[in-house]
Image (spheres, helix red, strand yellow):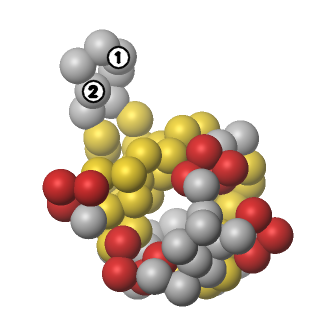
Amino acid sequence: MGRFYCARAYWLMHRDLLVLTGKILEEPVQPGTAIDLPKSIRGPGLVPIHSVQEVTFDDRPPELGVVIEMRHLDAAPMMEPSHLEGRELKTF
C-alpha cells in the first residue's frame, strides 16, 4: 500500500481528467495502481491511476501530479475535487 498527499485538485475538462498535485509519501504510486478517493467525501472509492507526471503552471514551479481519467469518476457525480485537498490518499 502506498500513500499520496494531495495538495491541490484540478478538473481538466477539455481533456476529461482529474489531476491531483502533491507528493508521494510512500510507494507505490504509479500508473496501473488504484488510488482511494474516499466515499466519505462522496468519492467513488478505488480508481486506477492513469499517469504520474510533472504538471507545469504559468505562475509557479512544476508539481508532481497523479492523473485520473474522468470516466472512472462516473460513479461519484457529487464528488467535489477540493475535498481531496490536504488529504493523504492510499494506493493499492
Q: Residue furthest right?
A: 40
Mark 2 crowdedness (10 Å alpha carbons): few <14, some 14-19, many ≥20:
few
Which quarter shows the C terminus? bottom right
Which SS class for mark 1?
loop
Q: Mark 1 points at which residue?
A: 60
Which quarter shows the N terminus? bottom right
Q: Is residue 46 left or right of residue 31?
A: right
Residue type, label 1: Arg
The image's mark for residue 57 is 2
The image shows residue 56 at horizontal and vertical percentages of 25, 33
Q: Is residue 87 left or right of residue 80?
A: right
* Residue at figure coordinates x 60%, y 64% from the top left: 79
The image's mark for residue 73 is none
Check whether the beta carbons of the residues at disc 2 and disc 1 lie within 8 A of each other. yes
* Residue at figure coordinates x 23%, y 19% from the top left: 58
* Residue at figure coordinates x 33%, y 29% from the top left: 62
Viewer-side residue, 42 vs 24:
42
The image shows residue 59 at horizontal and vertical percentages of 30, 14
* Residue at figure coordinates x 66%, y 81% from the top left: 45
Mark 1 crowdedness (10 Å alpha carbons): few <14, some 14-19, many ≥20:
few
Q: How far apart are marks 2 and 1 (CA)?
A: 6 Å
Which SS class for mark 2?
loop
Q: In which quarter of the image is residue 44?
A: bottom right
Q: In which quarter of the image is residue 86?
A: top right
Q: Which residue lies furthest to the left in this view?
A: 14
Viewer-side residue, 36 vs 10:
10
Q: Which residue lies furthest to the top in this view?
A: 59
